Image (spheres, rainbow, N blue to C red):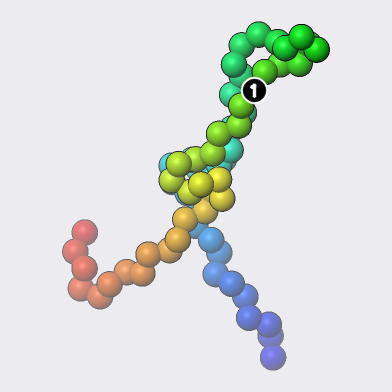
Amino acid sequence: MTPRTRPPSCICPNCNGFASAAITLGGRDPHGHLRTITTNCPACHGTSTTRRTPVRKGARA
């Protein structure tokens, strides 16, 4: 018997799979490091995937 496989997850349409981004604040700190903050996609919360929504029978577009 073959092992069960999970269906492929859907990529988030808002971030297109790039769920986290580092944004520079400009300038450098006293040690010479570039100051950055990390932000996550508000739609998928940094997972880069979304839930599949089942298609109802008889649903119109």
Residue sitting at x 49%, y 40%: 41
- The image shows residue 28 at horizontal and vertical percentages of 70, 10
In front: 42, or 13?
42
Q: Residue furthest right?
A: 31
Q: How many labels does the image show?
A: 1
Task: Assign the C terminus to one quadrant of the image.
Answer: bottom left
What residue is at 19 percent from the left and 64 percent from the top? 60
How packed mark 1 is, by other alpha carbons closer than 10 Å (few <14, some 14-19, many 20 or more), is some
Residue 4, percent across and down?
63, 81
Q: Residue sitting at 43 percent across and 63 percent down?
A: 52
Q: Furthest residue to the bottom?
A: 1
Residue at 25% x, 75% y: name it. 57
Task: Tell me the quarter of the picture where residue 24 sits.
Answer: top right
Where residue 51 appears, x then y in whole percent? 45, 61
Camera-side residue: 5 or 42? 42
Quadrant of the rendered structure where residue 55 is? bottom left
Q: Residue tagged by mark 1?
A: 36
In this view, 48 is above or below 61: above
Q: Is residue 9 above or below residue 32?
A: below
- Dividing the picture into quadrants, the one containing residue 34 is top right
Q: Is residue 9 left or right of residue 53?
A: right
Image side of residue 13 versus residue 7, left or right: left
Q: Decide which of 14, 61 is in the foreground and name it.
A: 14
Q: In this view, does 50 lie above or below 31?
A: below
**As rendered, which of 22 and 2 lies closer to the eye?**
22
- Above or below 18: residue 60: below
Q: What element carries label 1?
A: strand
**Figure quadrant of the N terminus:** bottom right
Q: What kind of residue is marked 1?
A: Thr
